[in-house]
Image (cartoon, rainbow, N blue to C red):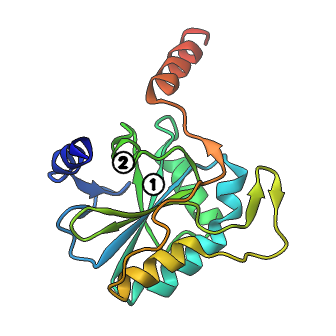
């Protein structure tokens, strides 16, 4: 528990800066009632499959004072490639953060893309995990979504209630450690 508090305190001075250089709220001391972080990448088919639902959730809760952020976790992707991906998947509902140093990945302890985190105005993680249960297992989508984990967490938070299931297991593409990205980039650069 002390480690979590230390992480929250260490992160509090860091505002969210989008790919256009615009500064947004910090996660602690946010002017929003809550913020949703969607950890994604452009080359994960499961993340891409969830794009319409991410857009629907952001649109549904924008007027209810819930902020939405797309957090691109691949430090090697260019801003131009991010913008192209945002356009291809109509992600105009969210501020776009490029987490080149994995500050948010580490802060939330995100493991896969897509993974969602609902963060309160004071920076507490209220929910973390899957967006819904569309995937029963990797490569095994359901015909119908029966559990809307993230929406349920947002609704509970807006009603002033505790989130009944604060953590679920997200299914998707593994987020490699930052050192792996850097080693891969050095290896590719060396062989050019």
Q: Is residue 188 left or right of residue 145?
A: left
Q: Give percent across and percent down for residue 66.
A: 37, 79
Binning the other alpha carbons within 10 Å of mark 2 as few (below 14), some (14 to 19) or many (20 upward) gives many
Q: Secondary structure at mark 1?
A: strand
Q: Quadrant of residue 162?
A: bottom left
Given residues 26 and 24, the one toward you in this image is 26
Q: Which residue is mark 2?
A: 104
**From mark 2 to mark 1, how far is it between C-alphas?**
8 Å
Q: Residue at x 61, y 50 (%)?
A: 42
Q: Quadrant of residue 156?
A: bottom left
Q: Which residue is mark 1?
A: 71
Q: Give percent across and percent down for residue 180.
A: 51, 23
Q: Is residue 36 left or right of residue 45?
A: left
Q: Is residue 66 left or right of residue 48?
A: left
Given residues 185 and 167, the one toward you in this image is 167
Q: Compared to 161, does 72 lie above or below?
A: above
Q: Residue extending furthest top?
A: 190
Q: Is residue 168 left or right of residue 157?
A: right
On residue 157, which mark appears? Answer: none
Q: Give percent across and percent down for residue 173.
A: 65, 44
Q: Residue at x 39, y 40 (%)?
A: 102
Q: Are marks 2 and 1 in contact (CB under 8 Å)?
A: yes
Whichever of callouts 2 and 1 sits on the residue coming sooner in the sequence is 1
Count of all numbered marks drawn on residues in the image: 2
Figure quadrant of the C terminus: top right
Q: Secondary structure at mark 2?
A: helix
Q: Residue at x 74, y 61 (%)?
A: 135
Q: Quadrant of residue 36?
A: bottom left
């Amino acid at each position: 528990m002390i480690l979590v508090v230390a992480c929250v305190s260490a992160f509090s001075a860091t505002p969210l800066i989008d790919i256009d250089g615009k500064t947004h709220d910090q996660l602690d001391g946010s002017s929003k009632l809550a913020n949703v972080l969607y950890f994604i990448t452009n080359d994960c088919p499961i993340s891409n499959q969830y794009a319409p639902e991410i857009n629907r959730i952001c649109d549904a809760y924008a007027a209810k004072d819930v902020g939405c952020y797309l957090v691109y976790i691949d430090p090697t992707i260019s801003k131009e490639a991010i913008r192209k991906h945002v356009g291809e998947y109509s992600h105009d509902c969210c501020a776009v953060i490029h987490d080149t140093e994995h500050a948010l990945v580490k802060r939330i302890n995100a493991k896969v893309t897509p993974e969602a985190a609902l963060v309160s105005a004071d920076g507490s993680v209220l929910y973390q995990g899957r967006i819904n249960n569309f995937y029963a297992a990797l490569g095994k989508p359901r015909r119908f979504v029966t559990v809307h984990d993230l929406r349920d967490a947002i609704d509970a938070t807006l009603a002033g209630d505790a989130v009944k299931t604060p953590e679920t297991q997200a299914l998707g593409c593994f987020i490699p450690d930052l050192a792996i990205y850097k080693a891969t980039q050095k290896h590719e650069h060396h062989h050019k």
